[in-house]
Amino acid sequence: MKDPDFVAKGLHGELKAVRLSIDLPMGARYVVVVYREVSPEDGFIITARIGSGVANLIKGGVIWRKK
């Protein structure tokens, strides 16, 4: 995902890039891209989804936040 609001650790080594999108037809929602980094230059997307809350997203801890 380009320009996430924050990146959180997953519970199984994955990372979650999260951005609040306010212009969706159903109202403001969080767009979440779950991915795994293989190296600093390589990685792959596991899945992506849209959700309304962030509590489950940050269980592993936020490792980066946009300033």
Image (tube, rainbow, N blue to C red):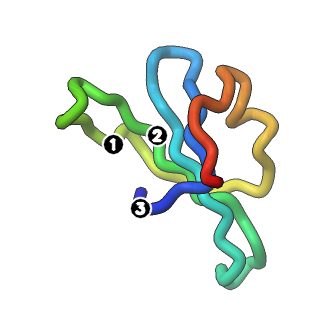
Earlier residue among tags 1 and 2:
2
Per the rendering, the mark at residue 28 is none
Give, as a three-letter code, the residue at label 3: Lys
Residue 40 located left or right of residue 22: left
Give the residue at mark 2: 34
Mark 1–mark 2 distance (CA, rounded to whole Å): 6 Å
Disc 3: which residue: 2
Q: Nearer the viewer, residue 62 or 56?
A: 62
Residue found 65% across the figure and 80% down from its top: 24
Nearer the N terminus, badge 1 or badge 3? 3
- Under mark 1, the amino acid is Ile
Camera-near label (2 vs 3) is: 3
Residue of label 1:
45
Q: Nearer the viewer, residue 60 or 47?
A: 60
Considering every residue shown, the one lying at the far top of the view is 12
Image quarter where the C terminus lies is bottom right
